[in-house]
Amino acid sequence: MIFKRLFNVFEIGALLFAVCASPSMKAAAADQAAKRDHKMTASQALPAPGTYEIDPDHSFAYFGARHHVIGLVRGRFDKVTGTITASKDPAACSVDIAIDPSSISTQNTERDEDLRSPTYFDVKKFPTMTYHGRGIRHVSGNSWAMDGSLTLHGVTKAVPLTFTFNGSFADVKPGKPARVAFHGSAATKRAEFDIGARDNLEELGASLAPDVAIEIDVEADAKVPTQ
């Protein structure tokens, strides 16, 4: 009985301590947690310095194009290649991406063929679209921005890209290169690339707002230097 009473006393005391802990102790704990989270964010903001080669089997470029202003057609490009260079110096970081426009898919065969035609991407005349950028600036957390150039349909325009470093794969097998993942987003207007004149006149009118949203998810492997 005595031991039971002692146990109850200790249990009540622990409960009162947890409930009545001083604000300063709680603030100190919160401050330590914030510092720990900040260190984790800083260490995860960019991958280890080096050049990473995009894995085309695990990388996709998606888009959403306005249809009659209020509608939205979604699609993707299945063939994405290129390299990403990470550096401790943000000005030295770079992105070089190539996309095969003939790999477009909107889940509608007739529409896909129309998009490959001279009315839109004209893939026979312009078989590749590219994005090149050098130099990044920190936005917040693991979010960064780059002012790169998109070349599409024979036209090159500056298109800002915002991206996040999603992290490094923890299950890479021994002897295999480090593997990382990124997510990027951008927006542009198709008329600036002389694409879809029919849509620009009949569907989008005089709107100056971007009518195409771009999302890209890539996985990339570190390139091992040649011995």
Image (tube, helix red, strand yellow):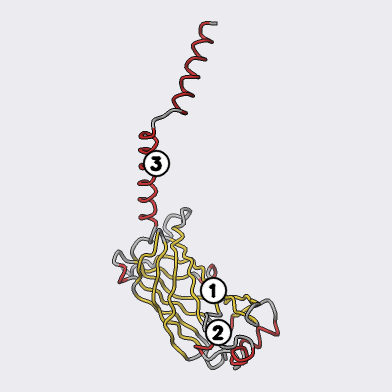
> For the residue labelled by badge 3, is the local secondary structure a helix, a strand or a loop?
helix
Task: State the separation of the CA atoms marked 3 and 2.
Answer: 48 Å
Q: Residue at x 41, y 29 (%)?
A: 21
Q: Position of residue 202 (x, y in %)?
A: 64, 90
Front-most of residues 171 and 39 = 39
Q: Earlier in the sequence, mark 1 or mark 3?
A: 3
User: Could you tell me the amino acid type at mark 1?
Assistant: Ala
Disc number lying in front (1 or 2): 2
How packed mark 3 is, by other alpha carbons closer than 10 Å (few <14, some 14-19, many 20 or more), is few
The foreground one among 171 and 212 is 212
Is the residue 51 above or below the residue 116 in the image? above
Q: Secondary structure at mark 2?
A: loop
For the residues labelled 1 and 3, the Cα–Cα distance comes to 40 Å
The single residue placed furthest to the top in the displayed view is 1
Does the residue at mark 3 contact the one at mark 2 (Cβ under 8 Å)?
no
* Quadrant of the snapshot with the N terminus: top right
Q: Residue at x 44, y 65 (%)?
A: 221
Of tags 1 and 3, the one toward the viewer is 3
Q: Residues within 10 Å of mark 1 (few under 14, many from 20)?
A: many
Which residue in the protein does label 3 denote? 30
Q: Is residue 21 above or below residue 127?
A: above
Residue that label 1 marks = 61
Residue at the image point whose x is 37% and y is 38% from the top:
27
Residue with the mark numbered 2: 207
Front-lying residue, 39 or 52: 39
Identify residue type, mark 3.
Ala
Q: Earlier in the sequence, mark 3 or mark 2?
A: 3
Q: Residue furthest left?
A: 89
Q: Residues within 10 Å of mark 2 (few under 14, many from 20)?
A: few
